[in-house]
Each structure stands twice: as C-alpha cells, then as structure tokens.
Amino acid sequence: MQNSSETNMRREIDEIPEAAARLLDRSAKEFAAIGSALRDKDPAFVVTIARGSSDHAALFLKYAIELTACLPVASLGPSLASIYHADLKLGRSATFAISQSGRSPDIVAMLEAATKAGATSVALTNTLPSPLAEASSHSLDILAGPEYAVAATKSYVNSIVAGLGILAEWTGDAPLKTALASLPQHFAAAVKLEWPELAASVAEAESLYVLGRGPTLAIASEAALKFKETTGVHAEAYSAAEVLHGPVALIGHRFPVLVLAARDAAETSVVEIADGLCAKGAIVHATSSQAASAMRLPFVNTGHPITDALVLILPFYSFVEASSRARGRNPDAPQNLKKVTETR
C-alpha cells in the first residue's frame, strides 16, 4: 500500500531498481540488434542530442563510450538543425538522441537531420511511438514507466542503463555486461543509503558545488540540476580539476561542497582536491573511503568503475527530495517548470 504522504518523486526514486531490472530483462534482443548495427557501421565518431537531465545522461554515455569504445563523442546543439539549418557531415557517425517524451521539436529535427545524413541513429525514449523514434534508424523504449514528478529520476537512470546495454553489446565488453546484470541489486542497496551529514551542511546554504571527474562529472551535473530544481537553491557542477581554475575563488568558510568519487582511475586525484578544499574552510563531503579531511559519505561499490559512478545518483536523489521538503517546497512541482518542455 502506498503512503499517501509520500511524494511522487520519492516513489519514483524507490522504483528505480525495478525499472532497471525491467529494462534489462526485456531489452536483451534490442541491445543486441542495435549493438550489431553499430558494429556494422564502425563509426568514426559519436554524437549525442539531448537537453536537461537527458543531456546529463548523454554526458555519462559520452564518457562510457570514450572509455569503452575509444571513440570521440561530441554533444550537438539541437538548434543547429531547428534554427540554423546547418548541414552537418554526420554520415560516418553513430548518433544517440535521448528524450523522455520523445517529442521536443528541436531534438527531433536534429536527429532527423543526422539520420538523413547517413548516421546510424538511436533514439532512447520513455515514449513509443513518438516523433523521435520515427526520426531514428533504431529506437529503444527505456521502460522507466510513468513518471509524474517534474524532476526526472528513474527515466534519467534508465536512459543511461539503456545506453550502457547497447554499448556492452556493441563492444562485446564482458565485464560491463556482468556489471549491468548486477545493477538492480546495487540500485536496491543504494536507494536505502542516507546522507544526513550532507543534509545538515546544506540546510541553510545559499549555494552548493558538486564535483566529479569522468563519469562522475555527469552525475555531478545531474545532481546540481536537481538541487536547483527541487530546493530553489543555487548549485553548480564542475570537474574536480576545473574547479581550481577559477570557481575555487568563491569557496570560503563553511561553503558546502559535494565531491562524487567512483572507484576508478580518477578517485585518488578527486579525493586530493576534496581534502584540499577543506583547508580553504569549505565543508566537504566525499563518496570515498580515501578521504582524509573531507567527510565520508556511504556509497555502494559495484565492482565496475562505470556502474560505480552511476549508483551515486540514487542516494543523492533521496537526499535532495528530503531537502526539498525540509525547505517547505514540493519536489513534485518545482517553480516555473513543467514535465515536458518542448523547444524549437
């Protein structure tokens, strides 16, 4: 029985493990077919098309593709097709478009242009049929199920899981396939984690930095957006390295910083920066057992660097939903936002 006092956002966060399991159980044939098409294409490069949370999912897949398939990935501005009518040379590319609704006109126009240019194009959407699916060479239903909260959660996660499923088949990456099979159980553990120390640090904050590097930079970008959307408080995401090239100037006494570190090659350098920010007076929380000065947040170790980064978003979602309510806001209906945004 559902708790009537729960927000839609809370319920949808709790549904993430089940939504991921559903996608992985039902989409094996689609993953294999699209992966085979990409092997046949043997693209010279990859491009992505998305906005908002979907663009953060695309950023995550950028790092995953670059690290796994060793191909460069670029994000295309949808206005290149819808406003500027640029005739891009995309025939040698693989193109991924991500949209929960599948009907934003500029996303559809850009994907349609890529497909017409000869790209092997893939639409990842929570809505089939949809204009985005019709504009693609291949479409995949991410099977997140209905999402009623304005702030996307399970559709963001399932977009990434879908992309990783395709990537694993495309590249034949056995460790990634194994990691994906275990994801639902890792999600189930991650959704139960609590970050009360972080909540206390940002309770009256007017700004927050969220740092990451590699795949965790994509998670940091999504986290900062959700913090702004649901709490109405300013937040910015930066690379843990890039923050030292200017943004660090704003960090002073008791400035809250969340550092998202995965068990990957960047963890040591990210934690060194986290500890260094403590010396500047910041209140720093990090998802790493290597942290010396920064306060350690609990995390789930998945045994794979890419999925290890992805599971970090679940405890953040739980934290930010609670933070929104603590500030007297409704996380289901952020001010000035609506569920489907259609831009041209």
Image (spheres, helix red, strand yellow):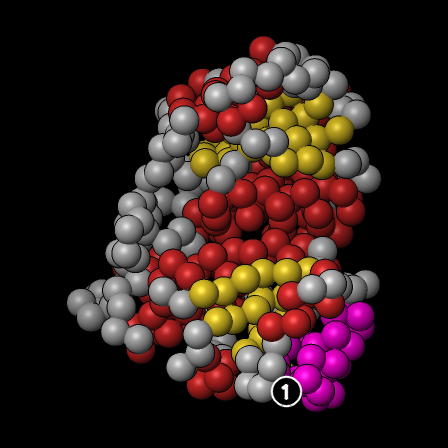
Q: Circle 1 — which element? A: loop
Question: Which residues fall within the magenta stretch?
Answer: 267-295
Task: Tell me the quarter of the image containing the C terminus.
Answer: top left
Dividing the picture into quarters, in which one does residue 242 lie? Answer: bottom right
Residue visible at 63% across and 87% down in the picture: 281
Q: Is residue 284 magenta?
A: yes
Residue visible at 45% across and 18% down in the picture: 134
Vertical order, 131 against 324 (above or below): above
Locate residue 25 relative to residue 152 in the image: left or right.
right
Locate residue 245 relative to residue 318 in the image: left or right.
right
The location of residue 36, given as percent across then percent down, is: 69, 26
According to the picture, the residue beneath numbered tag 1 turns out to be: 281
The location of residue 280, given as percent across then percent down, is: 68, 84
Residue visible at 20% across and 70% down in the picture: 5
Q: Is residue 182 visible?
A: no
Locate residue 318 relative to residue 305 in the image: left or right.
left
- In the rendered structure, which amino acid carries the disc numbered 1? Gly
